[in-house]
Image (spheres, grey):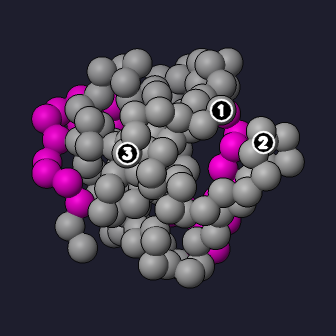
Amino acid sequence: MWEEADVQLVPVEWLKPHEEIKPRNRDKLLEMTKRWGGYTKPLIVDKVTGAILDGHHRFSIASKLGLAQIPVIAVDYLNDETIEVDVWPSATIESLTKQEVIEMSLSGEVFPPKTSRHRIADHLPPIHFPLEVLAQPAPIQPQD
């Protein structure tokens, strides 16, 4: 089970999306994030590549707001057997592997929205990182 201590701040530019977002969903989340004055949920990312596994809309919001850093939980994606990937029923592809997710994130291209469906056993800890803090210059990439 993850705890708040597992959350770290990373530079927004280190992160790599593998999937498009739905602008309408992003806009709703953007308004809520502004209302809350910060981030209340971390992204899940691969600690080696910076590939975003969960949190594409939160990543997009960081870019919209011009944030320098963003809260994440960094995981060993390829080697952590508790993290599974599948596709959503409406996806345009029939299957997807972890390696394909990493390759897409490193390619600079993205899958359509709601392609990958990650199953991550642990819940995300409640957090609150104020937008003012996230606007400050970011530290280096995650540490083990």
Amino acid type of disc 3? Leu
Other-residue count near label 1 (Cα within 10 Å), few / some / many at <14 / 14–19 / ≥20: some
Label 3, label 2: how far apart the Cα atoms are? 21 Å
Label 2 element class: loop
Instruction: Indicate the quadrant where residue 38 lies.
Output: top left
Question: In the rendered image, is residue 128 in sight?
Answer: no
The residue to which callout 1 is attached is 112
Dominant SS type (magenta): loop
Q: In the rendering, which numbered label is found on residue 62? A: none
Q: Residue at x 37, y 45 (%)?
A: 106
Q: Position of residue 90 (x, y in %)?
A: 84, 40
Label 1 element class: loop
Q: In the rendering, which numbered label is found on residue 106? A: 3
Residues rendered magenta in the picture: 113-142
Amino acid type of disc 1? Pro
Viewer-side residue, 34 vs 87: 87
Q: In the rendering, which numbered label is found on residue 91? A: 2
Amino acid type of disc 2? Ala
Label 1, label 2: how far apart the Cα atoms are? 8 Å
